[in-house]
Image (tube, rainbow, N blue to C red):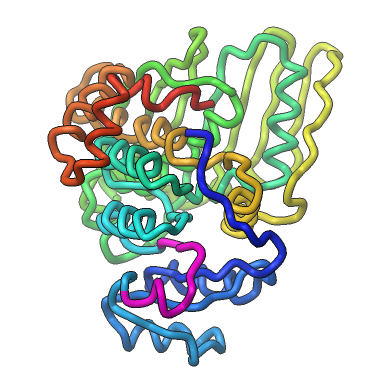
Amino acid sequence: MSVFATLGDTSSPVRVVQVGAGGMGRVWLQLLVDTPEVELVGLVDLDLEAARRALAEVGRAQIAVAASLSELVESTGAQAVVNVTVPGAHHPVNTEAMFAGLPVLCEKPIAPTVSRALSLAAASEASGQLLMTSQSRRYYPVLAEFKESLSALGDVGIATTEFFRAPHFGGFRDSMDHPLLVDMSIHAFDVARYLLDADPVSVYCDSYNPAWSWYAGDAATTAIFEFEGGLRYNFVGSWCSAGLETSWNGSWRVSGSRGSATWDGETSPRVEGDSAERSPKAPDAHPGLETIAGSLAEFIDAIRTGRVPSGEVHSNILSLAMVEAAVFSARRGERVFIGALLEDAYRDSIEAEGRADVAEVLTGWGSARSGLGPTT
């Protein structure tokens, strides 16, 4: 999808309702109240007292709270929604918001499964509203610099991410079957698609849990992706490796026919090889804005101008598909082809769809690949 409704008023602050007042919800609330281009007008959470406490913490105790989005849409004059609920609630909240005539910026993952994400892409088309995922780790000036540096490498054929951290989260992550793959790897996989300007074809993945791990599920993994053109992307990571930890963005190396580039996830990249001219660097649309602030800025720009943001749901589904394919591969012990996974998910999405208008859009695609269109 490349066409969605835009705001008539491009100068006044955008009136936003946030859904979700948990830990990450509080981070988003602070950003929203600190952003002049936004006016926070409501907060939705099943726990109303938690919502009120969260608003009081950011000095906005007077803002309306409710247990459902529908209670606030008309009374607040909302123009957009930021969805910071748990992943299992993303599909119903996003769908409700879009069919209430509101564009949505949603925390990752856009949905728990590729099947449900395809439903959301079709709902975006049926409602004419933008649905954007906050892939917040795309928004670093040094990442843009790293991407620009790859133009000096000639034909790129190998890319690798190493990710080694030892966070003690507690809570739901400790009991997940694949905590690293399901909760974190999408950031690296999405950045790989951004850097390489190519789509994934297949993956072979091995996940495991070191003896000292405090996680119930597999906290370490090695995944080898094939991308279009035969390029290989390797992800090696662990969430239970203390000492010499990498950046939360990982440590990257990309090799091509004329040299290699590395990025430590924090500072400027290093490039070594033949002296080739780089392509001109694209201007940074939101200079200085990183992580979720960058996501929010791109979202506001999109709903004001109609420019398609990088996290638009149709494109983002392939990043989620990389995660799902890696999990399937680890469970089955075999290579998984992402195109086949998408078409299986497409059939499941049509069968499970509860809205006739969304089902009509899904069926009209003919295939997942056709419905998603160009994605990189």
Q: Residue at x 48, y 74 (%)?
A: 77
Residue 210 visible somewhere in the drawing: no
Q: Residue at x 30, y 33 (%)?
A: 361
Residue nearest the observer in this picture, 221 or 372: 372
The x and y percentages for residue 217 are 22, 47
The x and y percentages for residue 157 are 58, 12
Quadrant of res 322: top left
Indicate yes or no whether the magenta region holds residue 174.
no
Image: magenta residue range: 71-83
Q: Is residue 130 above or below residue 322?
A: below
Q: Residue at x 41, y 30 (%)?
A: 318
Residue 156 visible somewhere in the drawing: yes
User: Could you tell me which quadrant the C terminus lies in?
Assistant: top right
Indicate yes or no whether the magenta region holds residue 81.
yes
The x and y percentages for residue 81 are 45, 63
Q: Is residue 183 above or below residue 190?
A: below
Is 10 positioned to the left or the right of 199 in the image? right
Q: Residue at x 28, y 81 (%)?
A: 47
Residue nearest the observer in this picture, 108 or 175: 108
Q: Is residue 116 above or below residue 22?
A: above
